């Protein structure tokens, strides 16, 4: 998964979770020649409003200014996970079992890298996925990205 370094995830969780929000995921990605993007996805049982993102952004900015865990220039983005919620942690794959998902792996599995199917849960460190009636097990460590497919 395109996760930020563990120390940055822990700093983010220790700042945001006491505020009553779930940290869905934290990404530190290259933003071209302008530096990096620190992207934080948050959620709550009531959903996320724009004011929630602004509040979390202000709090995280203050903490990041003091702790200085990211070298160089970066932009901070705080958002809800959206309808096509990304799955970052192995617990997410258990929590959202039964949902339709899209996955991309870092290497080839079953002769491919992209999968779309029903998430069945986890088995140890493997993600269980039903694709076109066939059970597939993919190592969590090989998941590059995963998202829920919105159902309308």
Image (cartoon, helix red, strand yellow):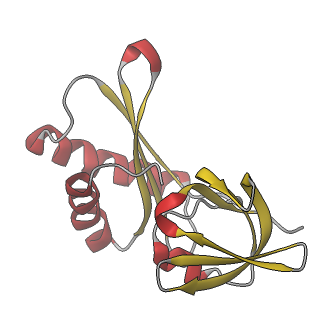
Q: Estimate the x, y position of residue 10 in percent, counting from the top left.
A: 23, 62
- In percent of the image, x 85 and y 69: which residue is there? 151
Q: Residue furthest front?
A: 111
Residue 66 percent coordinates (x, y): 9, 42
Q: Residue at x 76, y 59 (%)?
A: 115
Residue sitting nearer the eye, 52 or 34: 34
Quarter of the image containing the C terminus? bottom right
Tell me if residue 57 comes above or below residue 88 in the rendering.
Answer: above
Is 71 rendered above or below residue 130?
above
Residue at 24% across / 52% down in the picture?
Answer: 8
Q: Indicate the position of residue 34 as horizontal and vertical percent values.
A: 39, 15
Q: Is residue 124 left or right of residue 107?
A: left
The number of discs equals 0
**Residue at 28 percent of width and 65 percent of height:** 13
Image-based side of 95 in relation to 131, left or right: left
Left/right placement of residue 85 relative to residue 141 reads right
Kindly give the residue lying farthest to the top in the view shown.
Answer: 33
Residue 152 placement, left or right of 51? right
Q: Residue 130 location, x and y as percent? A: 79, 78
Quarter occupied by residue 110: bottom right
Give 19 or 25, whichever is nearer the viewer. 25
Q: Nearer the viewer, residue 148 or 62?
A: 148
């Amino acid at each position: 998964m395109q996760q930020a370094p563990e120390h940055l995830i822990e700093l983010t969780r220790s700042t945001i979770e006491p505020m009553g929000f779930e940290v869905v995921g934290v990404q530190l990605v290259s933003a071209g020649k302008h530096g990096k993007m620190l992207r934080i996805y948050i959620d709550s049982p009531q959903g996320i409003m724009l004011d929630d993102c602004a509040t979390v952004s202000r709090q995280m900015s203050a903490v990041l200014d003091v702790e200085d865990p990211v070298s160089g220039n970066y932009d901070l983005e705080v958002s809800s996970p959206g309808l096509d919620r990304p799955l970052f942690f192995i617990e997410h794959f258990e929590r959202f079992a039964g949902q339709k998902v899209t996955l991309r792996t870092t290497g080839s599995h079953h002769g491919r890298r992209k999968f779309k199917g029903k998430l069945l849960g986890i088995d140890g460190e493997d993600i269980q996925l039903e694709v076109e009636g066939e059970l597939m097990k993919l190592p969590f460590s090989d998941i590059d990205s995963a998202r829920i497919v919105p159902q309308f």
